[in-house]
Amino acid sequence: MTEWIPYERRVGHPADFRVRYRFYAQEEGGRRTLPYQGYRADFAYAADERLILYMIHPEFEDEHGQVIGREEHVPACGTALVWIVIPERRQDIHRHRIHTGTRGYMMEGPHRTAEVEVIEILGLFTNS
């Protein structure tokens, strides 16, 4: 596999926020195996009454806060940098909804694969 290039280097700005996450075990309706770095889960807010998916992608960190490589399975729980893919949604939706303590889910279609909680705001209000 090729080396993982962190999103910050690719896009030229910091992540929008950081989350603490926990992947659901298969017995809880989760995945059979843990994903690799580069996993393109969508995001759903826990507070929403109906399912709305957003293109907000995680970039997983190790226990020291360093972005992990492509060849590694991500830990079952830990922290991830999170990137809002569509800049217009950052302004009109997410800046109003994301704050420390916001809860949500990583999603594969209608299936919840992990629960998340926002633990730190990074570039959400300064990224264009």
Image (spheres, rainbow, N blue to C red):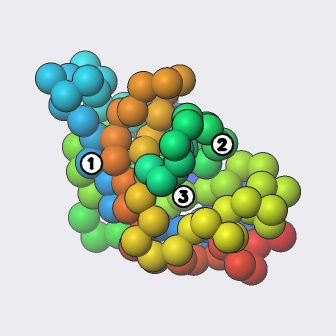
Residue 27, x across and y down, in percent:
15, 23
Which residue is painted at 19% across and 28% down in the image?
A: 28
Identity of the amino acid at label 3?
Val
Identity of the amino acid at label 1?
Arg
Residue 95, x across and y down, in percent:
69, 70
- Helix, strand or loop at label 1? It is strand
**View extreme (left): residue:** 27
Vertical comparison of 52 with 29: above or below:
below
Q: Which residue is mark 1?
A: 22
Q: Earlier in the sequence, mark 3 or mark 1?
A: 1
**View extreme (front): residue:** 49
Q: Which residue is mark 2?
A: 55
Question: Is 53 left or right of 20, judged from the image as shown?
Answer: right
Callout 2: few (<14), some (14-19), or many (20+) C-alpha neighbours within 10 Å?
some
Residue 55, x across and y down, in percent:
66, 42
**Label 2 to label 3: alpha-carbon separation:** 10 Å
**Label 3 to label 1: alpha-carbon separation:** 14 Å
Comparing labels 2 and 3, the label whose residue is closer to the camera: 2
Out of 84 and 61, give the one closest to the viewer. 84
Q: Earlier in the sequence, mark 1 or mark 2?
A: 1
Which residue is painted at 74% across and 80% down in the image?
A: 126
> Label for residue 82?
3
Q: Point out the image quarter for the C terminus.
A: bottom right
Identity of the amino acid at label 2?
Met
